[in-house]
Amino acid sequence: MVRDGIYYGIGFAAGGVFLSALLSPAYGAPLFVLAIFCLYFFRDPDRVPPSGQVAVSPADGKVVAIQHDTPETTQISIFLNIFDVHVNRSPIAGKISQVVYHHGRFMPANRAAASSGNEQNVVTIDAGDTTVRFAQIAGLIARRIVFYKHTGDDVGIGERVGLIKFGSRVDVFFGPEWEIAVQKGTRVSAGTSVLAKRK
């Protein structure tokens, strides 16, 4: 479990105990429900990435768009609802060559406009003969993007690199050397589902 979940869970549970003692258990019950939800939301299951020259999904969720931004770049957009695991993972092994944070709006993350207009953290991973870029995008509820790594860090495929709190979106960008292996509407799991294969 992500540490934040423990903090949120304890905070809501403490508030529930306080209201139950001060007023009645009925007033504390909603906070106990929120405490349980936070423990569920911030779960962080172990994942075993596949072998081979593949790129895995950096996020749990549903593929809501596959589009060609340019003739050389394909974008895969993944929407995370509040019931998905929100821990993000590296799509490939390599070195983090760039991390750029863009301030922006907080539109619903399932809208296409969120890819360009919402607050986001864009990460580029260089594997030597290829690079893959992905963006952690805040949503209407999710207003906190967390990234554990720094420019110059080495990462393994499927390694935990951060999280986005509550509903959000992750866009992944592939060059022409990659063959897309998913379709729109596919449910994917971070660190295990293959998004693309090397040609």
Image: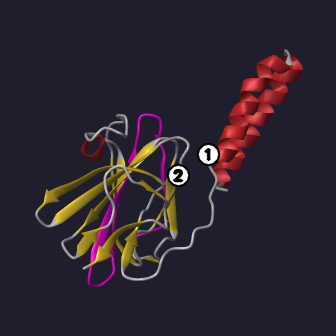
Quarter of image, res 53: bottom left
Q: Which residue is mark 2?
A: 86
Q: Residue at x 24, y 80 (%)?
A: 199
- Residue 148: x %, y % from top left: 51, 63
Describe the element under mark 2 as helix, strand or loop.
Answer: loop
Q: Are marks 1 and 2 in contact (CB under 8 Å)?
A: yes
Side of 21 where 144 appears, left or right:
left
Given residues 22 and 155, the one toward you in this image is 155
Q: How is the image coloured?
A: secondary structure
Residue 14, compared with residue 96, is above or below; it is: above
Asked if residue 127 is among those painted magenta in the image, a careful observer would answer yes
Marks 1/2: CA–CA distance: 8 Å
Q: Along the horizontal axis of the image, is 28 left or right of 103?
A: right
Numbered badge on residue 9:
none
Q: Which residues make up the magenta segment?
A: 123-151
Read off the residue under disc 1: 41
